Image: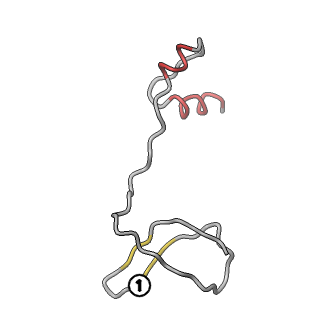
Amino acid sequence: MLTLETVADITEDGTLTARAPKAPKGRLRVVIVIDDAPAQTSRRRLPDLTEFRSRLGAKTYPGNSVIDMRAEER
């Protein structure tokens, strides 16, 4: 058994659309549980690590330091 967590859209006619990238392909038996809480559609931002990095004596990056650091590495 494989457990996936994703966000689905349900239309007025009851059609459910969801993405399951890690699921095996083909016709499968599925069980759907609908959470009462609304789906969070905004992307989670990574924390700004500038102050933490400066205390360690490491080079600081403005804004979202993890993304800025990775961009510089490329």
Nearer to the camera, 68 or 51: 51
Considering only vertical position in the picture, is 22 above or below 55? below
Q: Quadrant where the C terminus lies?
A: top right
Considering only vertical position in the picture, is 12 above or below 43? below
| Residue found 59% across the figure and 33% down from its top | 71
Q: x and y percent of residue 59 in the render?
A: 58, 16
| Residue found 41% across the figure and 74% down from its top | 34
Dot 1 surroundings within 10 Å: few (below 14), some, or many (20 or more)? few
Q: x and y percent of residue 45 in the render?
A: 44, 41
Q: Amino acid at mark 1?
A: Thr
Q: x and y percent of residue 17 in the render?
A: 46, 77
Outermost residue to the left: 12
Q: Secondary structure at mark 1?
A: loop
| Residue found 58% across the figure and 28% down from its top | 69
Residue indicated by mark 1: 15
Q: x and y percent of residue 36 in the render?
A: 34, 69
Left or right for 56, reference 63 = right
Nearer to the camera, 71 or 8: 8
| Residue found 33% across the figure and 64% down from its top | 38
Number of numbered discs: 1
Considering only vertical position in the picture, is 35 above or below 60? below
Q: Quadrant where the N terminus lies?
A: bottom right
Left or right for 71, reference 51 = right
Nearer to the camera, 74 or 59: 59
**What is the image's colouring?**
secondary structure
